[in-house]
């Protein structure tokens, strides 16, 4: 089956699923179709994300069906598929481009999030200001995290380990769920499910293999220093709150909270007073609503905010 035919079938399934008569039997048939081929999953996930990003299903159907398909001789299903794929790229703030040797590069802007389906059935979810390069071929599954943060759901394949290169560290798995964050030389890996091995990209010949990390474990590496944090499923769950557009703080310093908000927003928070930066806060906050966070600091802590639209300076 050609890629166009798979995309058209995926569009049909997606429209059927959104209808009022969708049943458990229909869901079973869809699940069987998805499991029949990784290409089916990739096509369906791409359209599904575009559908969700559009966020107005009733208006989207006629708009996409009437799109240039009639002028170009495309079927309504193909026109819908094309429109939804465009929504994935634009609505998710993700940009992709071809690079040599069959690899691709994806990146998000500040405040953007996006889902990248891979040909093997794996998925990468990109957080704000993130760039990854992917190479998935018959015998190779590799990703380079150039900057930012990404959540991986890896399709199990014993013949092809899935390798993530992040700075001086290499993350190797067969099939699992994990998070990798890179900020320059600092690399953090959190395991959600399965087993993950984090090792040096260029270990000495006498080095012993690194131990495998399991669910709830976090490893933080900065240059030659590596720390494995105490196992905490709750902390790992908090690390993933950005997937719902939320930043979670558990008695973090205000300085750390400000740095985290600055990752998601053009308006930057600056704290010149060390005592103010050392204050502890907790709670859930919408990542891209920095103004609401600043109002809360004023109301709850009586802090002063000087905001010129580009920079918000916090003082006692």
Image (cartoon, rainbow, N blue to C red):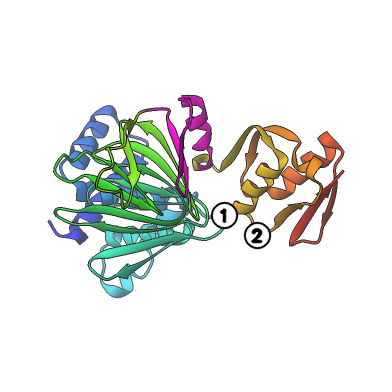
Residue 293: which quarter of the image?
top right
Numbered badge on residue 250: none
Q: Position of residue 93 (x, y in %)?
A: 48, 59
Question: Closer to the N terminus: mark 1 or mark 2?
Answer: 1
Task: Give the residue at mark 2.
Answer: 266
Query: Percent position (x, y) of residue 4?
Result: 21, 61
How packed is label 2: few (under 14 Cα within 10 Å), some, or many (20 or more)? some
Mark 1 crowd level (few <14, some 14–19, many ≥20, 10 Å Cα): some
| Element assignment for label 1 | loop
Residue 226 is one of the magenta-drawn residues: yes
- The range drawn in magenta is 215-242
Answer yes or no: is residue 12 visible.
no
Is residue 279 shown to the viewer in this render?
yes
State which quadrant residue 85 falls in: bottom left
Q: Residue 300 in magenta? A: no
Q: In the rendered image, which residue does mark 1 sit on?
A: 111
Report helix, strand or loop for mark 2: loop
In front of the other: 97 or 230: 230
Residue at the image position 31 percent from the left and 58 percent from the top: 134
In the rendered image, the vertical position of residue 204 relative to residue 106, given as above or below: above
């Amino acid at each position: 089956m050609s890629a166009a035919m798979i995309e058209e079938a995926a569009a049909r399934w997606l429209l059927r699923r959104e209808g009022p008569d969708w049943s458990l039997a229909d869901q079973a048939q869809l699940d069987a179709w998805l499991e029949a081929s990784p290409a089916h999953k990739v096509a369906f996930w791409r359209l599904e994300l575009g559908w969700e990003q559009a966020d107005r299903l009733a208006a989207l159907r006629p708009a996409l069906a009437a799109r240039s398909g009639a002028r170009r001789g495309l079927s309504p299903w193909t026109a819908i598929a094309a429109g939804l794929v465009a929504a994935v790229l634009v609505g998710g703030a993700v940009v992709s481009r071809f690079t040599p040797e069959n690899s691709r590069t994806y990146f998000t802007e500040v405040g953007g999030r996006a889902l990248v389906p891979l040909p093997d059935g794996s998925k990468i979810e990109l957080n704000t200001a993130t760039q990854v390069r992917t190479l998935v071929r018959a015998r190779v599954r590799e990703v380079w995290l150039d900057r930012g943060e990404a959540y991986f759901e890896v399709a199990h394949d014993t013949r092809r380990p899935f390798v993530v290169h992040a700075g001086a560290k290499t993350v190797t798995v067969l099939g699992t769920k994990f998070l990798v964050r890179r900020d320059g030389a600092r690399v953090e890996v959190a395991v959600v499910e399965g087993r993950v091995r984090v090792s040096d990209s260029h270990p000495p010949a006498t080095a012993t293999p690194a131990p495998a990390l399991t669910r709830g474990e976090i490893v933080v590496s900065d240059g030659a220093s590596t720390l494995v944090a105490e196992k905490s499923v709750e902390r790992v769950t908090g690390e993933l709150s950005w997937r719902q557009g939320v930043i979670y703080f558990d008695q973090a310093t205000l300085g750390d909270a400000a740095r985290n908000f600055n990752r998601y927003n053009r308006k930057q928070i600056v704290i010149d007073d060390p005592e103010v930066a050392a204050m502890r806060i907790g709670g859930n906050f919408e990542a891209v609503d920095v103004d609401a966070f600043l109002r809360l600091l004023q109301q709850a802590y009586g802090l002063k905010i000087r905001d010129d639209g580009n920079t918000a300076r916090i003082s006692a």
